[in-house]
Image (cartoon, helix red, strand yellow):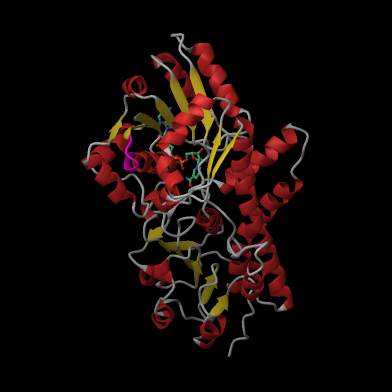
Amino acid sequence: MHITVIGTGYVGLVAGAGLADFGMDVICVDKDSQKIGLLNQGKLPFYEPGLKELVERNYQNGRLSFSTDLKAAVERSLVIFLGVGTPSDGEGGVDLSAVQEVAMEIARYLNDYKVIVTKSTVPVGTNRWLKALIDEHKTVEVDVDVVSNPEFLREGSAVEDFMRPNRLVLGSDSPRALAIVKDIYRPLYLIETPFVETTLETAEMIKYASNAFLATKISFINEVANLCEKVGADVHAVAKAMGLDRRIGSKFLHPGPGYGGSCFPKDTHAFALMGRQHGARLHIVDAVIEVNARQRANTLLKLQNALGGDLKDQVVAILGLSFKPNTSDIREAPSIFLVKALLEQGAVVRCYDPTAMEEFKRLYSGDTVYYASNPYDAAKGAAALVILTEWNEFRNLDMQEIRRVMANKERAPAVLDMRNIYDPAKMVAMGFHYDCIGRPVPKGI
Ligand SMILES: NC(=O)c1ccc[n+]([C@@H]2O[C@H](COP(=O)([O-])OP(=O)(O)OC[C@H]3O[C@@H](n4cnc5c(N)ncnc54)[C@H](O)[C@@H]3O)[C@@H](O)[C@H]2O)c1
């Protein structure tokens, strides 16, 4: 079966390569000719574990190709997957211009019956609007059906999540379209992936409700962590014991510097707005957003506390720029908020990340921020070191060496462990001013 996937970002490229691996003939189309150029040279535009191998394998066996020519791709394909971006419109809503642009182009190039499968995250009602838009602008009298197939992959384990999802959600009014899409996903059916077949609106809602719920767990445990600090309790033991209750589950109960990434921030805002627009305000989601904003500010407060208030001319090292480990994605990452605040306050920033520094340089050039060659280089001369992303390579640093290279003037060098990866007692015993989230820290010796 011939398939087009529009958008070669995290979702589109993983879906395109994954569907090719399922035996489909896939053309991935993007309007970004630079991206397509890179892909045609065998290079990936971003880092995602396992994706290079998957792309290479299917490119070489001829089932996967890359193009900017949407017309040719649409004409050839029975099924068209949408993986274009749906960023925030800056006012809490969703910018659907890429979806609209693509819909208009599809309408123009229609030559036969097509199934449009929306993987992009879109507000409830968008898929119905999309079909109406294409029907209104098509130049040939052929049928088009839409299927809402929200994507739940996690960056950092996107390939595994696509190939072995917890569930597949398919929303549509059309039994014909559903049958075609189910056929495409037959390999998942064979490994007993649960398929949830539902309406367009319900499928769209499932995506937002799922992301909002996960964000709620994060904001919840962050608030619990902050209370733990006040009363001397250990949030890790609390989260572990909570998670052992199967009704709660252990996932997404890790305190940190606030959630970031390309999905949770924009999706929670969009969901909250949807609630207000439809007269069914989502009070919990509103609170989740507010708690997350406070949590982002919390890192700065802790840093000010560690450095005696004034950050002017203080050297601060940041380990971890990506919003989570195993990705180069920095969208809405806590690092962006921290670096901005630090520079505003006159601090000197030295940072290191295994994969995200090139991305970060687009926001802050090497003249504004120092990009280190490794964690020890970042720590050189720093009064404080902040661990923002729990990359594995940060879990076992030689802390004696870190302490040696940091500034050791009138106060002990500070380590702010926003992912709780070091043992507070050991860090204090080594002579650091150590702080973390929601765990008791022994007094210095
Ligand atoms: N990134 C994730 O982890 C994730 C997970 C689940 C769902 N989603 C959703 O999937 C969608 C895509 O997310 P992403 O992270 O892959 O985005 P992305 O920004 O990485 O990629 C989007 C791609 O679409 C392309 N594009 C935009 N307009 C186009 C057009 N008119 N024609 C052709 N190509 C066009 C862009 O050039 C870009 O390459 C979003 O709706 C997002 O919310 C993302």
| Residue 83 occupies quadrant | top left
Q: Position of residue 58 (x, y in %)?
A: 27, 42
Indicate whether 78 appears above or below 168.
Answer: above
Indicate whether 185 appears above or below 161.
Answer: above
Q: Position of residue 192 (x, y in %)?
A: 48, 49
Q: Position of residue 412 (x, y in %)?
A: 52, 81
Q: Is residue 96 found left or right of 189 in the rendered image?
A: right
Residue at 42% across, 40% down: 186
Q: Position of residue 41 (x, y in %)?
A: 22, 41
Nearer to the camera, 415 or 50: 50
* Dominant SS type (magenta): loop
Indicate whether 88 appears above or below 287.
Answer: above
Residue 305 lies in the magenta-colored region: no
Q: Can the viewer see residue 234?
A: yes
| Residue 305 occupies quadrant | bottom right
Magenta residues, start to end: 20-24
Residue 23 lies in the magenta-colored region: yes
Image quarter for ligand 1 equals top left
